[in-house]
Amino acid sequence: MAKLTPRSQDFSEWYLDVIREADLADYAPVRGCIVVKPYGWTIYEHMRDFLDRRFKETGHVNAAFPMFIPLSFIQRESEHVQGFAPELAIVTHGGGEQLEEPLAIRPTSETIIGYSYAQWIKSYRDLPVLINCWNSVVRWEKRTKPFLRTTEFYWQEGHTAHATHEEAIEEVLRMLNVYYDHMREDCALPGIRGRKSIYERFAGAINTYSVESMMGDKRSLQSCTSHDLGQNFARAFEIKYLDRDNTEKYCWTTSWGLSWRLLGAVIMVHGDDQGLRLPPKIAPIQVVIVPIFKNDAEKSAVMEASSHIARTLKAAGLRVKLDDRDETPGFKFNDWEMRGVPVRVEIGPKDLANGTVALARRDLPSKEGKSFVPQAGLAERIQALLPEIHQSLLSQAEAFLHGNIRACYTWEEVKEAVQDGWALAPLEDNPANDEFIRGELSAKTLNFPLDQTEGEWKCVVSGKPVRERALIGKSY
């Protein structure tokens, strides 16, 4: 097994090493595309299933829309086409013939869904429309990195239509909180909810909200977004309804999305120099059993006991792997640490004699995370341990996040803070300020946190009086 590049030496190389050595993904023959291997896809499946359940609990239903969109649809909303034009993949020929109208491979689905909603929505009785899609989209990225930024990526995109702007805003913030809860409760990922700056908001939106997460190298990853689209797309696609007072009105629409880049966040937030550290809820394997023996006589008894433990743990609803490969215990330990399995159970002849097993937690360093426990009641012990491991990972990540955000009130303090973390600084929401920050610091305005301290300060860029502070940092 190849050794990982230390995180402290080259975080980017470490990330790519983990993806390769943990068997998550491989490169595809098309630039910027990846092949997701079964272990990586299973992690994504667990994340997707938890999130899908949360969507349905809030009244959303799933549907599917075409991946080919008439180019004229993209052009109907002026900000939208300007925002996505550099990333569009265009189909000009099909079946050996030139198409009458070029087709865009969807970079996002607001336009094709806007067209459909215009056909479906006629009356206030048809509202709200609450639809989610699980699909892939294509954006022709210049700089790519597996899971974080790929030409084709998998995600979900929610699209809703409402009678009033108040209902739409409520939806936007509700889904932001659904993402926030999913990240914390299923993936052990902390983050900061906030409003994106005017400069950073989604093309065609009147407001965009995000959860920003701090990776292990202190860069930000925009983990999800939720957009208040106002009536921009409704007017572009004639999404109207007849209200109770018998007048025709435009709908208010929203969209929101979270992609498999959250899997990249799991790697970069929780991983260490030994590889992945997976939160138990999304781990493909929650418990691995490693039998230890020296000869055939020991092997027979140890394997019988190991098989019995595996059956018991599976019957208790745990995802279990009995590693019976013809490899040394040391190789297996390293392999499963690389893959981030939350709990390892070791059993050898001495354990049989004592009625115990060795239990190793992946979230804690080797000696601190290892204990000897009775075989009796093992399933119940591990079931109780998994939430502890989840909380341990979340607490570690939370301490790292808040420990690397610095309150700043001058430009010089901001310059210093973003070299090794984030700045929380008074900022006027003005695109000129965003451009200045990008040009001077190679950093960006991450968001204006929803949780703001009351006060009045001077903007660190323009010097104008402001009543809110923004997170500023380097990002992916």
Image (cartoon, rainbow, N blue to C red):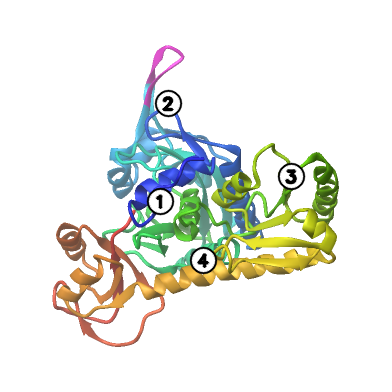
Asked where in the image residue 55 lies, by quadrant, the reply is bottom right
CA distance for labels 1 and 2: 36 Å
Left or right: where 365 falls relative to 379: left
Sequence order check, earlier mark of 3 and 1? 1
> Is residue 326 found inside the magenta-colored segment of the image?
no
In the image, residue 157 sits, relative to residue 208, either above or below, namely above
Q: What residue do we see at 40% from left, 49% from top?
A: 14
CA distance for labels 3 and 2: 45 Å
In the image, residue 427 sits, relative to residue 237, either above or below, namely below
Residue 29: mark: 2
Q: Nearer the viewer, mark 4 or mark 3?
A: 3
Q: Nearer the viewer, mark 2 or mark 4?
A: 2
Q: Which residue is mark 4?
A: 180
Secondary structure under tag 3 reads loop
Q: Main secondary structure of the magenta part?
A: strand
Asked if the residues shown at circle 3 and circle 2 are in contact, with their CB atoms under 8 angstroms apart, the answer is no
Q: Measured from the top left, where is residue 407 in percent x and y?
A: 29, 79
Q: Measured from the top left, where is residue 287 in percent x and y?
A: 70, 54
Q: Which residue is mark 1?
A: 233
Q: Amino acid at mark 1?
A: Phe
Which residue ends up furthest to the top in the rendered image?
96
User: Magenta span covers which residues?
Assistant: 91-99
CA distance for labels 3 and 1: 69 Å
Q: Residues within 10 Å of mark 1 (few under 14, many from 20)?
A: many
CA distance for labels 2 and 4: 35 Å
Q: Which residue is mark 3?
A: 294
Sequence order check, earlier mark of 2 and 4? 2
